[in-house]
Amino acid sequence: KEIKLFCPATIANLSCGFDVLGLCLDNAGDEMIVRKVDQKGVRITKIVGADLPLETEKNVSGVAALAMLETLDELDFGFEIEIYKHIKAGSGIGSSAASSAGAVFGINELLGRPYSRKDLVQFAMQGEKLASGNAHADNVAPALLGGFTLVRSYVPLDIIRIDSPEELYATVVHPQIELKTSDARSVLKQNVSLKSAIMQWGNVGGLVAGLYTKDYELIGRSLHDEIVEPLRSVLIPGFDQIKQTAYENGALGSGISGSGPSIFALSRGKETAEKIAKAMSDVYEKMNLPYEIHVSKIN
Ligand code: HSE
């Protein structure tokens, strides 16, 4: 018995929502096969498209799977996982989250769904902890639940799925450098000023309200980051130009995707999203910098 999965890429943070907001892309992601086998335990049998460890304890899929199985009565069978990576590690669109979420989702299906999708988030987070040193849920939650998600609280874990308007598209450009999440977290300050915090939580509330009320203008006004973006954007080549280009071509908002170096723009309608993709491409072409670009509906 086996299951074939699409493990979606995700955009975490969404400017104002560091470590709490994220969204799921519908056409960028990895593939995975999870198979029920006689041999007990979890084995990663194949990884195509990336140089990642096959050892279960060193692989984010393996660690997430083990975290889940530890909570269940011992099974007299086990699982094999094959991973076909399309999302590059260190790209900022949730490569480790896709693998962590895929493994627990697949095993849960093969076990007849002992857990809800929301329950699975806590296990997938253990993969994120291995990858970045921090068990953040803002990529794994949208990868498992789809659409937009909010981590209202980490302790206790409280994940909320947020409704969003139909015509919202994301354009994501990945300048071909690798930026480790752990490195991008090390540049952050541990304290924020009250003034910055007020602006930030105003925007988080505004973004969530805009999504629910399908108010595209409000979504756009709320996509700002007072706290993290100023510290991280210096690590990303061409960041200011890409962002400016996105706005000039009709983006509602633009910012760093996850911990970067990918940069996202949200827009209303596919046509605008594609126009932004073209304009972003032109910027990196002119800079002679290799890049990859995706336009995706948010799903
Ligand atoms: N919220 C995390 C960070 C996402 O920005 O460090 C990492 O993909």
Image (cartoon, helix red, strand yellow):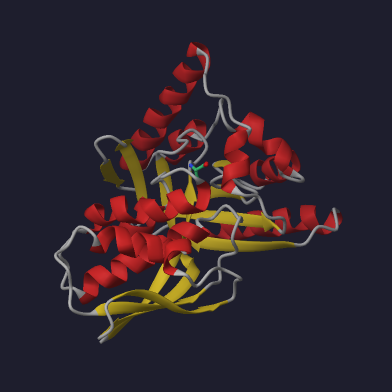
Q: Is residue 152 visible in this depiction of the protein?
A: yes
Relative to 3, say whether 58 is above or below.
Answer: above
Observer-nearest residue: 113 or 23?
A: 113
- Does residue 266 appear to the left or right of 176 in the view shown? left
Q: Which quadrant is home to the C terminus?
A: bottom left
Which residue appears at 45% of the width and 35% of the height?
A: 17
Judge from the rendering whether residue 22 lies leftward or rightward of residue 188; answer left or right.
left
The answer to which of 100 and 26 lies nearer the viewer is 100
Residue drawn at the location 50% of the way across and 37% of the way down: 220
Residue placed most toward the observer, 245 or 289: 289
Report the number of discs: 0
Residue 84 position in % (x across, y down): 50, 77
* Residue 151 as seen in the image, left or right of residue 232: left
Is 78 situated above or below 292? below
Q: Is residue 167 visible?
A: no
Percent position of residue 209, x then y: 34, 34
Write the residue at 24% across / 64% down.
69
Q: Give residue 230's position: percent from left, percent from top.
A: 65, 29
Which x, y percent locates residue 12?
48, 46
